[in-house]
Amino acid sequence: MKKRNFVILIVLLGGLTTWFILKNTKSGTSDKDKTAFAVENVEEIDKIFLTNKQDGNLLLEKKNGIWLVNGKFEANKPTVTFLLNETIKKIRVRGPVPAPARDNVIANMATLATKVEIYMNGELEKVYYVGAPTSDLSGTYMYLQDSKDPYITHIPGFDGFLSSRYPVAENDWISKLVFDYKPEEIKSVDVDYPANITESFTVSRKNEKGDFEISASESAPAGNVNYGAVKSYFAMFGNKTCEGFAMFEASKFDSLIRSKPICTITLTDNKGTIHKLKVYFRASNERDHALYDNDGKPLTYDPSRYNAILDNQKRVLILQDIVFNSIMIKYSDFFFKQSID
């Protein structure tokens, strides 16, 4: 009797084990590794490769503590930090894709998903695909390589989808920072106006005490220089960012660099590093504001924006006058103003 009960118990346990394995194999939820999209130690990530059929490829790579975009431009630090700490680290699985929708989700992901490769300490750590949002826009369809099924993912506390956090367009990742210096980090600034050389000038640091000098051409206008304004000029070079990047065809870009800039700003820091910003007029178009002057005539150039090239890079920056007018000043702007009685 005891032997019979023991056999029955073994059969029941074996059946229960088989049922449990089959159940979890179908649902794809038994192996946590197959649903673990998140990476906990994001500080160890040193390379992220993004690719999709619509936009091509994009490589984010950390070298000497600095993130680079496609090996050419410095990445926008807040954007990369947000991806690492607020997305890659916090992704969680809400549940498997419902069976009726599974085939459609897989078909859509095959053509529209963005592939994400994450490397840690030089080794490939994780590969997953980011698909479209769910119909209620509160989740995102994602598939972890080698798993059985796609899943609906989300970030706890965030009511939205994650697809937009993985853009492949280069300009979405490039840093918009042009100048970001503290006054004590600058050795000299030269501002050259090719069409108005009399207003060109150079401000230089004389010593570590914070004394400065300003020089201009012999033909520069005469005036009583306000050395307080000269001393404060270096303070204008903190957190100067561009609005964005202009899309120029090769021929148009070549034409721009052959033209004469409005001004060229050359900054030399205390380490001897030189940054040169060439500023050009930006053609007015229907998308700009203030297309007409006070007489109703169309404007040739945008009065509030400029095109610019930094350090001879192969890209065109869009500068806002309201941001850069404090450093695009003329020699005569340093003069004490004559009081009018």
Image (tube, helix red, strand yellow):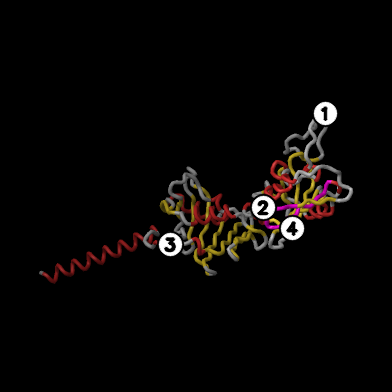
Q: Is residue 92 left or right of residue 282?
A: left
* Res. 264 in view: no
Disc 2 secondary structure class: helix
State left or right for residue 316 relative to residue 35. Answer: right
Residue that appears at 71% across and 53% down: 211
Q: Position of residue 13 (x, y in %)?
A: 23, 65
Query: Circles 1 and 3: CB distance less than 8 Å?
Result: no
Query: What is the CA distance from the residue labelled 4 to the residue labelled 2?
Result: 21 Å
Q: Earlier in the sequence, mark 3 or mark 2?
A: 3
Q: Which residue, as the protein is rendered here, is positioned at the far left?
A: 1
Q: Secondary structure beneath disc 4?
A: loop
Indicate which disc residue 287 carries.
none
Nearer to me, 143 or 110: 143
Dot label at residue 34: 3
Under circle 1, the secondary element is loop
In front: label 3 or label 2: 2
- Identify the residue under disc 4: 311
Mark 3 residue type: Lys
Going from the N terminus, do you reach mark 1 or mark 2 first?
2
Q: Residue at x 49, y 56 (%)?
A: 88
Q: Which mark is residue 183?
A: 2
Circle 4 or circle 1, nearest the eye: 4
